[in-house]
Image: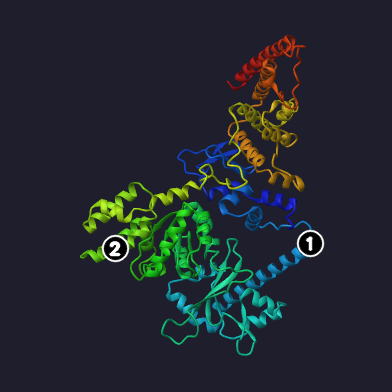
């Protein structure tokens, strides 16, 4: 598969405001000359351990070791691959991406998809013009005004109107050079079962463009103007069918507009209908998304989890809404997603509540949201019949799926007491009837690797973090490399004086030192094959991010470079002395590449002269170290 050019990646990286990008996920404050810090968006914490370098555009968390660059950050927060992250940022920054040479089949497939997206975008624009300019759409405009929706909000969501003519979109698209096959592929046209002739799928309907997170139109949801009981043909809502571009249940309505607001608030509000989402956005509640007329899917829950850690369910209080809530709770539990329920008056959806009582009413309902389990328990207790054994049994049956979602703890105990008190039964009886199958839960949990839970990027084949597995003795080596980055001019000289293979004790740190030579001012900057090589080494990329953030945490102090370099020299001498003193079986394979093999006597014992020479050299280095340290203290005061 053809990739985008290294020059394209560089242009995107340059165009991104990294502080603005990360600030959508967590509040940042300046914490050094080239460092911002805040609470980590990848794990829960109360004291900031997460830092970014806004110039190099990298991040590192000293708590969970999450690390990477601007592209990695979007991959982890948006749940996309590198290509998706690059495309998202390019769209956001208005940068045109250039591709490397691709084979004919790939190029043809890409151009075909781009044409389909262009056709959908043109059709959406046409429907939007029809809504505001055609006389036929007068009734549609009246309906939308009756729902309390203003022109500004409707234009933001590109709401439109499909004329009643059978072939308006068909003929206009053919005149513009699109084919019937492309109209079928996008779901804009279909064939008549009677005569096989093509005709427009959407007619005499209000259209709601269905978009991906990049804001590209993938299909349409279309509402008939007539309500139940009126003379109208077809279903009330008609959506695009699954096709090459649109796949039902993969997206959330309004996610392209709500994503940044949800990330900032840490909360997403989930509604059912298109007009609910538009009404909430119009009321200033910009983190609302909709189900696109489908039952909640695993993919949509994944999208919600990437947007924010908490979801407020603002669903209708009817049976369908309650089933959707239970489905959401089951799926959310697997994704560690917190669910709360916005209590709505019976028979009223969010758009109606805003229309009747104003934005303050929905804001109050949102503020009064309840944990999902408590809401469901209170709903069953309020609606059930506790006057008979049969009624109490039915209530317990209704509560079982709710309690199955609860982990043992205070909330489970509190709700058990609530149910027992209301039904007039002992807590022991309620526990026996409602307690989840803990054995089954324990077996499920045992399959998960606890070392990877909650760590971004810690999936198969990915490191849990650059700091994982690095020993204490390597702290000095990392500190030295960070100092080299902080003072690149002096750092180049200090780094050139070391033998990478001998002075660094892990292969990862050796790769980092080799990488930094000649690149201290921009450690991550590369184009072409070198950039691809770095992307293929996530451990090195994460370590470089850690070093860059560490380098920006304090003002540059070049006088500490000789101190750190001499520490590395002392550590190397100590390792050589230890190797010289070790018995032969323990010295197998010592020293590592780059270290000189100590001489031995004819009997196999280490030569006393060798150890003596090393000891003298160590004493000289120690004196140099003490002097360098004193000079550094004088400079720093």
Query: Which of 357/415 is in front?
Result: 415
Mark 1, residue position: 103
C-alpha gap between disc 2 and disc 1: 63 Å
| Rendered position, 432 above or below 172 | above
Q: Quadrant of residue 146?
A: bottom left
Q: Locate the C terminus by quadrant.
A: top right
What residue do we see at 75% from left, 17% from top? 598
Residue at the extreme bottom: 195
Which disc number belongs to residue 279?
A: none
Q: Quadrant of residue 271?
A: bottom left
**Does residue 627 appear left or right of residue 142 in this picture?**
right
**Does residue 468 appear left or right of residue 106 in this picture?**
left
Task: Nearest to the eye among marks 2 and 1: give it.
Answer: 2
Query: Which of 448/476 is in front?
Result: 448
How packed mark 1 is, by other alpha carbons closer than 10 Å (few <14, some 14-19, many 20 or more), is few
Q: Locate the N terminus by quadrant.
A: bottom right
Label 2: element kind: helix
**Residue 572 at least partly seen:** no
Mark 2, residue position: 395
| Rendered position, 293 above or below 615 | below
| Rendered position, 336 above or below 204 | above
**Does residue 153 appear left or right of residue 586 in this picture?**
left
Percent across and percent down for residue 620 are: 70, 12
What residue do we see at 74% from left, 9% from top? 609
**Does residue 170 appear left or right of residue 398 in this picture?**
right
Percent across and percent down for residue 601 are: 76, 11
| Rendered position, 416 above or below 47 | below
Percent across and percent down for residue 242 are: 59, 71
**Along the polypeptide, which appears first: circle 2 or circle 1?**
1
């Amino acid at each position: 598969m053809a990739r985008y050019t290294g020059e394209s990646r560089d242009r995107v990286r340059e165009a991104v405001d990294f502080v603005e990008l990360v600030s959508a996920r967590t509040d940042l404050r300046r914490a050094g000359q080239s460092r911002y810090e805040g609470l980590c968006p990848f794990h829960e914490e109360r004291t900031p351990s997460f830092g970014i370098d806004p110039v190099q555009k990298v991040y590192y968390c000293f708590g969970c070791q999450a690390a990477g660059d601007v592209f990695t950050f979007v991959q982890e927060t948006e749940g996309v691959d590198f290509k998706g992250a690059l495309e998202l940022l390019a769209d956001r920054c208005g940068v045109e991406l250039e591709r490397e040479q691709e084979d004919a089949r790939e190029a043809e497939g890409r151009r075909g998809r781009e044409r389909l997206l262009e056709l959908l975008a043109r059709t959406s624009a046409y429907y939007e013009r029809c809504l505001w300019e055609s006389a036929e759409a007068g009734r549609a405009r009246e309906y939308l005004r009756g729902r309390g929706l203003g022109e500004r909000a409707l234009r933001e969501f590109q709401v439109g109107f499909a004329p009643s003519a059978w072939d308006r979109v068909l003929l206009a698209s053919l005149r513009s050079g699109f084919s019937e096959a492309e109209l079928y592929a996008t779901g804009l046209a279909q064939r008549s079962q009677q005569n096989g002739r093509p005709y427009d799928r959407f007619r005499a309907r209000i259209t709601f463009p269905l978009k991906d997170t990049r804001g590209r139109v993938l299909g349409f949801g279309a509402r008939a103007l007539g309500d139940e009981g009126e003379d109208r043909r077809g279903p009330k809502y008609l959506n695009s069918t699954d096709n090459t571009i649109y796949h039902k249940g993969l997206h959330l309505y309004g996610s392209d507009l709500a994503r940044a607001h949800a990330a900032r608030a840490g909360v997403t509000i989930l509604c059912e209908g298109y007009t609910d989402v538009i009404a909430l956005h119009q009321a200033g509640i910009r983190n609302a998304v909709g189900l696109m007329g489908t039952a909640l899917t695993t993919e949509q829950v994944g999208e919600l989890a990437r947007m924010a850690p908490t979801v407020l369910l603002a669903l209708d209080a009817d049976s369908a809404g309650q089933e959707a809530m239970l489905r959401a709770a089951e799926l959310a539990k697997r994704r560690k997603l917190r669910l709360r329920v916005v209590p709505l008056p019976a028979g009223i959806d969010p758009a109606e509540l805003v229309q009747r009582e104003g934005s303050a009413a929905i804001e109050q309902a949102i503020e009064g949201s309840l944990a999902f389990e408590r809401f469901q328990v209170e709903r069953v207790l309020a609606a059930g019949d506790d006057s008979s054994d049969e009624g109490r049994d039915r209530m317990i049956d209704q509560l079982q799926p709710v309690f199955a979602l609860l982990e043992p703890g205070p909330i489970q105990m509190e709700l058990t007491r609530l149910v027992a008190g209301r039904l007039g039964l002992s807590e022991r009886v309620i526990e026996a009837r409602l307690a989840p199958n803990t054995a089954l839960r324990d077996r499920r949990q045992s399959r998960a690797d606890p070392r990877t839970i909650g760590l971004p990027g810690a999936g198969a084949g990915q490191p849990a973090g650059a700091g994982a597995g690095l020993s204490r003795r390597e702290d000095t080596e990392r500190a030295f490399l960070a100092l080299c980055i902080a003072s690149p001019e002096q750092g180049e000289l200090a780094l050139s004086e070391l033998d990478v293979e001998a002075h660094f004790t892990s292969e990862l740190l050796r790769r980092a030192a080799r990488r930094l030579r000649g690149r201290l001012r921009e450690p991550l900057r590369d184009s072409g094959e070198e950039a691809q090589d770095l992307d293929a080494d996530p451990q090195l990329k994460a370590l470089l991010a850690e070093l860059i953030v560490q380098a920006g945490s304090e003002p540059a102090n070049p006088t500490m470079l000789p101190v750190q370099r001499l520490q590395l020299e002392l550590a190397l001498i100590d390792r050589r002395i230890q190797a010289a003193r070790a018995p032969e079986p323990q010295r197998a394979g010592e020293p590592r590449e780059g270290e000189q093999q100590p001489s031995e006597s004819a009997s196999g014992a280490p030569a006393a002269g060798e150890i003596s020479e090393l000891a003298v050299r160590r004493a000289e280095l120690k004196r140099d170290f003490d002097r360098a340290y004193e000079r550094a203290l004088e400079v720093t005061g």
